Amino acid sequence: MLRVYNTLIGRKEEFMPDSGKIRMYVCGPTVYDLSHLGHARSAVAFDVIYRYLKYRGYEVFYTRNYTDIDDKIINRANREGVSSQEIAERYIKAFDEDMEGLGVEVPTYRPKATETIPEILGVIQALLDKNCAYIIDGDVYYSVRKFDGYGRLSGKNIEELEAGARVEVDERKRDPLDFALWKASKEGEPSWDSPWGKGRPGWHIECSAMSRKYLGETIDIHGGGRDLIFPHHENEIAQSEAATGRPFVRYWLHNGFVNIQKEKMSKSLGNILNIRDILHACPAEAVRLFLLSSQYRSPIDYSPDVLKEANAALERFYATLERIESYLISVEVKGESVEHILRDKFETDMDDDFNTASVIGSVFYAIKEANRMLDDAESGRRDPKETAAILCGFREDFRTIGSVLGVFNKGSAQYLEEKKRGISLLPEEIEGFIRERNEARSKGDWEKSDKIRTDLGERGIVLEDYPGGTRWKVR
RNA sequence: GGCGGCGUAGCCAAGUGGUAAGGCAGAGGUCUGCAAAACCUCUAUUCAGCGGUUCAAAUCCGCUCGCCGCCUCCA
């Protein structure tokens, strides 16, 4: 039984979709700059949720939008002297590249706000017809007071919000909490025709329109970062439910932030880490492993060290996987029953609000088990066939888990191959050095043999001597 | 000020009523010419603190302290 933490009720509850088809919407980026680690966390968290739901046998219709019209885009365009569209296209492309780099699966639908204008106009018109919105000088505002449930998602009440409202209130609005559905365009700004004059959509309305267009009036899951709970998601609920008269979202899921030195990563604090910079310095699987090492709702603190740790953990995983794979080549497995203890644990953990941190713990527990069994089997203290059957189960379960987490996903050969691309030496050259070193070793010339090992070490090659011979790997 | 969340070993992090997963770092050991890798042992009588409920609490309740987020664009 899958249980998820639903922000709407503030606790975990059983996930019961209406049917085997799941409609899921996640708020995507506003495309005015490169995406940062925080975006990566949200994308990876919901990528794993998407994959797991599919793994569980659901058909998932996953929509993630691009907000491609917005003040920040316009500002940047003006600053650079190019069109808003050009800015949006540039950063959509960049975002897509980053997602691909992170191994994030492509959602079913990836709509853009600017391609949903007719539907946006439709929702606004419906709200005007129902007297939930009003027009002032070509702007259209949503009348928050007309919506009973306002504040339910964020646990706020209207009176308190008003009391704490910060300045800069637009005097024309009937109520400080009212927000723009449609903004009349100023000279030179991108605009679309509407019954209320030329203008562009407000931020919140696009998600209501896109969600409805691609997934219908009531959807199963709506996700995004915690900071979107208020006002963005609160406003989406108000708009959608007032317009359709039906519940908007059944399960609201929100991911925690990536912090740097305990503080939220954000533009205003200037502590941004771009995805592409990180990906440049570190394999994608290590980034994902870092992100998935905490439960998706918890805050996680970034530092260069934790990424290094994730990378080291990955290294350990693949080194053991390689051992397992070589062992399974040497020992025939047939007719032995393969057990899937790991897979069962994986499902139990994931069923509990996608507890990837616990899954990763189990994987490394299994890694230790596997190494222990291999040590014992290799020294004849363990039955080879029985060992092979268990390791075979591990290997299959690693693949299963890897396919959902997008980590531990490669064959060990592939992983090691990729690492070898980064080095300046040819494998034949390295083999040559190893032969030379072993000749020296056989003569007891430790000085020479150690120098060869040190020299290779400086070029990123690590040597390991085993009873069967010397092996090398890339650090 | 209002609302929400968090506080588990040197660090990261699971565990939400049945007696503290896992990783990194550290110490000792096995193996090795020496290493490396791997394995073994050790490293939280205790879960911010104080009370309460219970046969039983890190887990539930209350209070205190500390940190963070939202209330304004934000993943």
Image (cartoon, coloured by chain):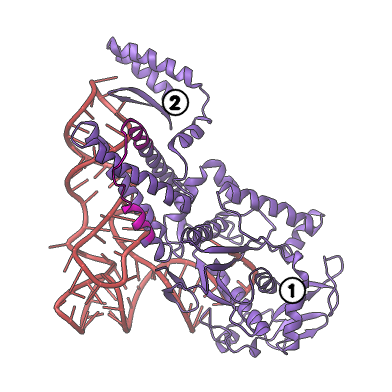
Pick the residue in front: A229 or A273.
A229
Relative placement, left or right, of A436 versus A335 is right
Disc 1 is attached to a residue of which chain?
A
At mark 2, the secondary structure is helix
Pick the residue in front: A103 or B1.
A103
Q: Nearer the viewer, mark 1 or mark 2?
A: 1
Chain B image colour: red
A182 is within the stretch colored magenta: no
Q: Which residue is mark 2?
A: A458
Q: In x, y percent, where is residue A68?
A: 72, 62
At mark 1, the secondary structure is helix
Earlier sequence position, callout 1 versus callout 2: 1
> Where is residue A36, by image quadrant?
bottom right
In the displayed structure, B64 sits above or below A257; it is: below
In the rendered view of the protein, which quadrant contains the N terminus of chain A? bottom left
Relative placement, left or right, of A230 versus A348 is right
Q: Is residue A171 visible?
A: no
Q: In x, y percent, where is residue A174?
A: 72, 89
Q: Residue at position x 76%, y 77% from top?
A: A122
Q: Residue A120 got which mark?
A: 1
Do residues under tags 1 and 2 come within 8 Å of each other at their CB atoms?
Answer: no
Q: Residue at position x 27%, y 36% from top?
A: A374
**Amino acid type for the residue under numbered disc 2:** Glu
State how many labels appear. 2
Q: In x, y percent, where is residue A391?
A: 32, 42
